[in-house]
Image (spheres, grey):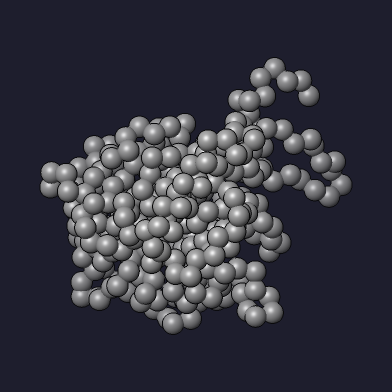
Amino acid sequence: MKHRFALQCVVFPSLYSQSALFRTTLRAIAVLVLLGWWPLSALANPISQLSSPQSFIAHPSGEGYFIANANGEPGTADNNGFISKLDRDGNLLDRHFIQGGRGDTILHSPHGMGIAGDTLYVADITVIRGFHVQSGAPTVTVPLHPFRVEALTDLIADGSGQLYVLDTAGNAVYRIDPQHDFEVSLYLQHEDMGSPSGLAVHPRSGRLWIASLDNGNVMEIAEDRTMTEVISNSFFTGKFRNLSGLDFDRFGSLYLSDMTAGKIWRVQPDQSMQVIAEFLISPSSVKIDRRKHMILVPYLYADGAEINGLEQPINTGTQRKRKRTLSDYGLGWLEGDEKP
């Protein structure tokens, strides 16, 4: 995986309380990288002109992408957050497609996002906000009453249109049912979640998976709401520092972003692991465009994001491995008239 927003491993003493000078320095470094430090610029699609991007998702129908920008210190209720809209090729269409403080729009510090029907749902500190996916007009605000939530982070919509959202500080997953007047229920709460910050639905089992910010564990939640540790990050087996996001591709491989270590991991269905990108500057909530087999990475403290092609699985065993081509990385258009 080739990437532009890469330099050296950045250690964050506190992921959400950096000084202004520290953040400015990181952003300046990212600009230098963007302007040419990475020699193979054709192999990735970087997006700049962002402001503290916390999440990055694809429209499930392939119509484009959305990036949630805190536009300041994450978690601050300043009605200054915004959502950027990209076209289907990853080009920036509207930097301020949805803007807090514009008209009757309220949006403080947007984080996780999910699309169900014609609505883009956004986790915004302690509430869920809905916007029309085409016009950006606000449609609904869902307070999580009667529950006391502290810091909503990742949000997803499952195949049936149900919404799930993480309360990282509260070690909880909540479910919201848009089809029943946005009924809110506590799906699961457990201290062993370890400040969950990443949430995804497995493409085959339909089960929820979560990634821990504090302990780096990855857990699966079964239908009976029991939680199983799938990947342990103990003292002896630890590979991760602070997991900030996770998602699956359509083949069942899991991708994890480690914000502190500056790495993206891929975990195959057979549990084999590999680092597919490293030396990244603050990779936040990683997501996968399953339709196009692309990885979407927002860089929180670099004010940028990136779309990158992923390698397709290759058959093994008695069959001979075929030669990899640019199409395996979502870049077939670069091959031109190249002959096999």
Depth check: give the residue in front, 20 or 212: 20
Q: Using the image, determine if residue 39 lies above or below residue 56.
A: above
Rendering coords of residue 30 (x, y %):
50, 46
Residue 252 relative to residue 132: left or right: right
Residue 138 relative to residue 112: left or right: left
Residue drawn at (13%, 44%) of the image: 103
Rendering coords of residue 211 (x, y %):
51, 67
Residue drawn at (40%, 76%) of the image: 171
Depth check: give the residue in front, 3 or 192: 3
Rendering coords of residue 283 (x, y %):
51, 55
Q: Residue furthest top?
A: 337
User: Can residue 317 be seen?
Assistant: yes
Kindly indicate the quadrant of the structure image that contains residue 337.
Answer: top right
Depth check: give the residue in front, 97 or 246: 97
Rendering coords of residue 125 (x, y %):
28, 64
Q: Quadrant of the N terminus?
A: top right
Residue 252 relative to residue 148: left or right: right
Residue 107 relative to residue 267: left or right: left
User: Can residue 250 be seen?
Assistant: no
Residue drawn at (45%, 49%) of the image: 27
Residue drawn at (78%, 24%) of the image: 340
Kindly indicate the quadrant of the structure image that contains residue 44.
Answer: top right
